Image: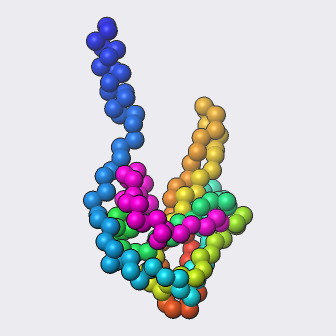
Amino acid sequence: MKKMFLLFLVFSTLFSCAHIIQRQARFINDEYAPYRLPGTSVIHGQAFLRTRGGDVKFAAGRTISLNPVTSYSTEWFELGIMQGNILSSPDPRIKPFNKTTIADGMGIFEFTDLPAGEYYVATAIIWEIPSQWGMRSTGGTVGAKTKVGPGQKVKIILTR
């Protein structure tokens, strides 16, 4: 009986832990060179999800992330944002290039003073619903890839 309990404990511990995917892409300084200085471009948008019942859930008060498109950030976007995986800690050199803002009550956000280029924009939209065990979280992540030219203002919608 003791052996069975120990096996159960080991397997439940192994399978209850979130699997962290090790990043394979490398941070390449040259890919980030165009994004080192401020620019004159703006990315403006709104983030929301629609429930099965048709209700709209806005990204109100949620952090919106903006990342230049590089081989390094593409791995984060595809595996983390689009597929919902948990990735290992990012390379600390990425920090000056990642920008965040908080969406307003309607999920509207804006990034200003951006260098021209391509960007990933993403956020999580989470809300609670009642279940037989109390309230539980639901929702998901939304993201998009966009391109902005010098002095240009681009509008995007983050949803699925």
Side of 68 relative to 11 (left or right) = right
| Residue 57 visible (yes or no) | yes
Confirm whether residue 56 shows in the render: no
Q: Is residue 83 above or below residue 114?
A: above
Residue displayed at 56% across by 92% down: 151
Q: Residue 142, percent across and down?
A: 51, 63
> Nearest the camera: 96 or 145?
96
Answer with the quarter of the image where residue 123 lies.
bottom right
Range shown magenta: 77-103
Determine the residue positioned at 67% across, 61% down. Answer: 60
Question: Residue shown at 70%/66% (left/top)?
Answer: 104
The residue furthest right is 105
Q: Place residue 1 in its image quadrant.
A: top left
**Way the structure is coloured:** rainbow
- Of residues 18 and 30, the one drawn nearer to the viewer in this rendering: 30
Q: Is residue 74 above or below residue 41?
A: above
Residue 155 counted in the magenta span: no
**Figure check: 9 above or below 63:** above
